[in-house]
Amino acid sequence: MTIRIYLVVDDEHKGGAEFMEVDSTSFVIDTDVEADNLRRMDIVEAVIAFIREANELLQQEIDLSPANQRVVDIVSRLSARLRAGYFPEEIEAILDNEYIRMNLRSLQHKLSEAECLAELDASRRICQTNQAVIADRLPNWNIYMELVGKELTILRQLSLRDGRADEAPIVFVGSGSLPLSAIILHLCGNAEVICVELDAAAYKASRALLKCLGLSNEITVVMMDGADFNYSSYKRIFVASLVQNKEAVLEQINRTASEPLVAVRTAEGIKQMMYESIDEARLNRQGWTIAARTRPDDQLVINSTLFLKRVACGERGH
């Protein structure tokens, strides 16, 4: 009797699976569960090996800008891997791997740097064309439309429930060089948006881009750390994925804002390879409760978004 064992092939240019034939006297796979476990182990090992490859390349490269095609390629491949579907057991095994645990934060930092440089390059190139810019032709527009569209749906529901003005100004912390979220929040949410950006190059590039788009009056940018901004005049606040000091920003919002509704972007499951995941257990202890959330879209969106409200007196965890 011969058994066929299918093996997952980790090769970007080969599809399907390969098999080898072995004699049943050598060993026997008794159940489909055992075969499925072997398949999952192959997938987990392949993903870990690829993440290691990506991390080591990013740590070695000095130039993480779009001018470095090796960086562009590895980030693109990693993003595609993270959008693939995985079983919970596979995700748990990947995240629990010692190499992943030891290198996750440094990988996130390099990916953040690469993303910021890519956005800065795109923003500058658009402004240098000296041509009319159409918003929906901006890079990654469809991804951000999907993400912000989900966020606006929940924002409107919560605003209506709480009696907040649906068109009240929105503060967006960490808007970056290419403030797509702020642009969509204005165009689709019909709201004034105040962008808070700490990085000087991103501040300058985003202001130039908004001028090209004719949106400088509707979307303003201030150069400041979100942890220092005074939120007292605002009740609707977004915090971007790449904001490094989210905890300090949330503390400042808590101190200065009255009844704020905060949409803070995070990542869950395997997608936290690319973006920092918020410790939800700590939110309640810091005075927040999760009122709603969005889920990622495996085809497009990597981020999740938590909608936070201040915890009522006596409800905070210990």
Image (spheres, grey):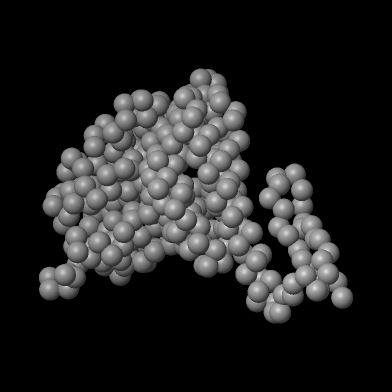
Position of residue 198 measured from the top left corner of the image (x, y, whole percent): 28, 33
Of all residues, the one furthest to the front in this rendering is 25
Q: Position of residue 279 (x, y in %)?
A: 31, 59
Indicate the quadrant where residue 288 lies.
Answer: bottom left
Determine the residue located farthest toward the bottom in the rendered image.
Answer: 30
Whether residue 108 is visible, yes or no, is: no
Q: Note whether 110 is above or below 246 in the view shown.
A: above
Q: Residue at x 12, y 73 (%)?
A: 314
Image quadrant assignment for residue 78: top right
- Front in this rendered view, residue 44 or 20: 20
Q: Position of residue 83 (x, y in %)?
A: 57, 54
- Tell me residue 113's x, y (percent): 42, 34
Question: Is 169 on the left or on the right of 116, as rendered?
Answer: left
Work out whether 153 lies above or below 148. Answer: below
Residue 192, located in which quarter of the rendered image?
top left
The quadrant of the picture occupied by the C terminus is: bottom left
Whether residue 1 can be seen here? yes
Count of marks placed on residues: 0
Q: Residue lying at the far right in this picture: please name it.
A: 1
17 versus 73 height, above or below: below
Q: Residue at x 78, y 70 (%)?
A: 26
Q: Residue at image x 72%, y 53%?
A: 9
In the image shown, does 291 or 53 lie closer to the viewer? 53
State the quadrant of the N terminus: bottom right
Identified at 51% across, 37% down, the residue is: 56
